[in-house]
Image (cartoon, rainbow, N blue to C red):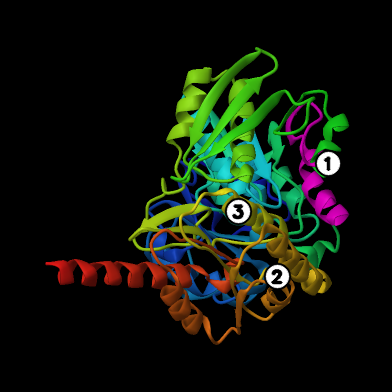
């Protein structure tokens, strides 16, 4: 990458000390972590909840940074210090705001399609699926992990280079105005909203509020852009009139341009679906390495983007069938998104990455549809950030559990007790936040070959700890039995 002195000087209210020392060839990289600074980088000092990047400006300089972006408060106290003489300091009022401004300047250097994806749930999976489909034809830049905020999005954009044909970006939010700002930075040519659900009700207050927040993507995008819309979601479908270029997808909506039908949930955790492209009248059957109706809709979203970008249907099918939630391999048990683990005859659905009412209901319905020779065990941690609706939403979830007929329900946290009480499960056990280990111990005793265990909760509940404990104990149990046989 390259940012020139002129690019920096175009920032509002900027001041550069020792501007004559600014590198003639410009900035070669951006870093917000002094430990990762390379020769010629611009170090951006950010005030965080736990650390202040301004405390590491000298360290970044020693590591080879060409300049540092700092706020005016810090500069007024430190710019005259000896160690910062002859070192360009880019002084601004707000470093996070101007990191975004700088990313917008850099993004404008590239005349390529930018696809921005947001939604209450499924946006990371859809982002990865869309990138996998487009990679069959193009060189794709995508958001890594869920770097979808005011820092992560700019850092992703700074990875753009002349080799990229398209970028697939995830936009996250839990406050009004954030999607609008992220859209300003990314300036997408295409937008996709996965759904509108009960996530972050603490901040958005109602589903209408959530819809308004997600809709900021389309309000801020150019009218000439293209919208991909989940036609099964009434809130998302309502955005359609705003765009002349719109592509609808869904499992239920008859007017969808890309329609799908679930053919089978298989015992091995795969989902067989049929996809129909109304424009070409072509149909294809796909076996996804993903489980659940919500993942079928996620795959439809990716197929819709693929069709719009004229990726060959056979390549779309191959990309979707090859996609696995384990593509981003790490050691040990990590927070999962409907990740299927099979240990010693037990099937574990590790969906511990996050939870909101809609995503939990989707996971429960998926579990209900799966065939099992043993028990189906539901393990749920609190759904956070629901505000005043928390007790109601947790109790409502308990009613869903009762309607689906689950008998084994283990709940964890202050709010999940409302779900436990409403579930009317024969074997319902609730554990407070100090008893996660007790829950995991009992779950291990309860679980036997042939059982299916669903584990899900909000990120703050760290339900992957329960999955890791269960996996470790099941493997140890299997090892003991093997040794006894020998």
The verdict on residue 228 being magenta is yes
Which residue was labeled with disc 1?
Answer: 234
Nearer the observer: mark 3 or 1; the answer is 3
Out of 417 and 295, give the one closest to the viewer. 417
- The extreme top residue here reads 280
Which residue position holds label 2? 423
Whether label 3 touches label 2, CB < 8 Å: no
Number of dots carrying numbers: 3
**Picture residue at 45% right of the left edge, 73% below the top:** 446
- In front: label 2 or label 1: 2
* Left or right, residue 394 beside residue 442: right
Above or below, 146 relative to 428:
above
Q: Give the residue displayed 42% in from the left and 58% down from the top.
A: 450
Q: Residue 400: x, y in percent?
A: 72, 61
Q: CA distance from mark 3 to mark 2?
A: 15 Å
Secondary element under disc 1, as helix, strand or loop, is helix
Please name whichever residue, 120 or 440, is drawn nearer the observer in this view of the structure. 440
Give the Cα distance between marks 2 and 1: 28 Å
Under tag 2, what secondary structure? helix
Of marks 3 and 2, which one's residue comes earlier in the chain? 3
For the magenta stretch, what is the residue range? 207-234
Q: Is residue 6 left or right of residue 29?
A: right
Q: Residues within 10 Å of mark 3 (few under 14, many from 20)?
A: some
Earlier residue among tags 3 and 1: 1
Given residues 114 and 57, the one toward you in this image is: 114
Percent x, y of residue 361: 68, 56
Label 2: how many Cα within 10 Å (few below 14, some 14–19, many 20+): many
Give the image quarter of residue 76: bottom right
Residue 228 appearing in the image: yes
Q: Residue furthest bottom?
A: 434
* Residue at image location 66% in from the left, 40% down from the top: 116
Q: Which mark is residue 368?
A: 3
């Amino acid at each position: 990458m390259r940012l020139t002195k002129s690019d920096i000087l175009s920032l509002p209210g900027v001041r550069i000390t020792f501007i004559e020392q600014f590198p003639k060839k410009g900035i070669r990289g951006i870093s917000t972590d002094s430990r990762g600074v390379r020769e010629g980088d611009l170090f951006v000092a950010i005030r965080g909840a736990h650390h202040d990047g301004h405390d590491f400006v000298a360290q970044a300089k020693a590591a080879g940074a060409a300049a540092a972006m700092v706020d005016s408060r810090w500069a007024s106290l430190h710019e005259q210090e000896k160690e910062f003489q002859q070192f360009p300091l880019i002084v601004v009022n707000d470093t996070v705001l101007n990191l975004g401004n700088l990313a917008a300047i850099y993004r404008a250097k590239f005349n390529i399609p930018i696809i921005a994806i947001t939604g209450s749930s499924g946006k990371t999976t859809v982002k990865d699926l869309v990138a996998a489909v487009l990679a069959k034809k193009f060189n794709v830049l995508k958001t890594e992990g869920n770097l979808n905020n005011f820092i992560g999005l700019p850092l992703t954009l700074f990875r753009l280079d002349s080799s990229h044909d398209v970028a697939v970006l995830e936009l996250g939010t839990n406050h009004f105005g954030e999607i609008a700002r992220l859209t300003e930075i990314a300036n997408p040519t295409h937008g996709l909203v996965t759904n509108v659900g009960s996530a972050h009700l603490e901040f958005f207050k109602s589903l209408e509020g959530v819809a308004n927040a997600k809709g900021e993507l389309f309000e801020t995008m150019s009218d000439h852009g293209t919208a991909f819309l989940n036609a099964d979601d009434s809130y998302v479908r309502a955005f359609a009139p705003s765009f002349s270029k719109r592509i609808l997808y869904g499992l239920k909506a008859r007017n969808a341009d890309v329609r799908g039908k679930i053919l089978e949930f298989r015992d091995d955790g795969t989902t067989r679906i049929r996809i129909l492209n109304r424009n070409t009248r072509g149909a294809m059957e796909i076996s996804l390495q993903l489980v659940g109706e919500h993942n079928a809709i996620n795959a439809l979203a990716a197929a819709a983007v693929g069709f719009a970008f004229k990726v060959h249907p056979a390549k779309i099918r191959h990309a979707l069938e090859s996609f696995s939630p384990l593509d981003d391999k790490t050691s040990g048990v990590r927070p999962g998104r409907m990740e299927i683990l099979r240990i010693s005859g037990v099937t574990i659905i590790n969906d511990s990455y996050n939870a909101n009412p809609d995503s939990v209901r989707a996971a429960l319905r998926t579990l209900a549809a799966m065939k099992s020779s043993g028990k189906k065990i539901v393990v749920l941690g609190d759904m956070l950030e629901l505000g005043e609706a928390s007790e109601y939403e947790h109790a409502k979830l308990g009613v869903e559990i009762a309607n689906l007929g689950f008998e084994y329900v283990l709940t964890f946290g202050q709010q999940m007790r409302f779900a436990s009480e409403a579930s009317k499960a024969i074997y319902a056990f609730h554990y407070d936040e100090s008893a996660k280990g007790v829950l995991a111990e009992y779950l291990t005793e309860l679980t036997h070959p042939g059982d299916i265990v669903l584990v899900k909760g909000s990120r703050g509940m760290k339900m992957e700890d329960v999955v890791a404990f269960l996996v470790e104990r099941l493997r140890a149990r299997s090892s003991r039995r093997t040794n006894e046989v020998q």
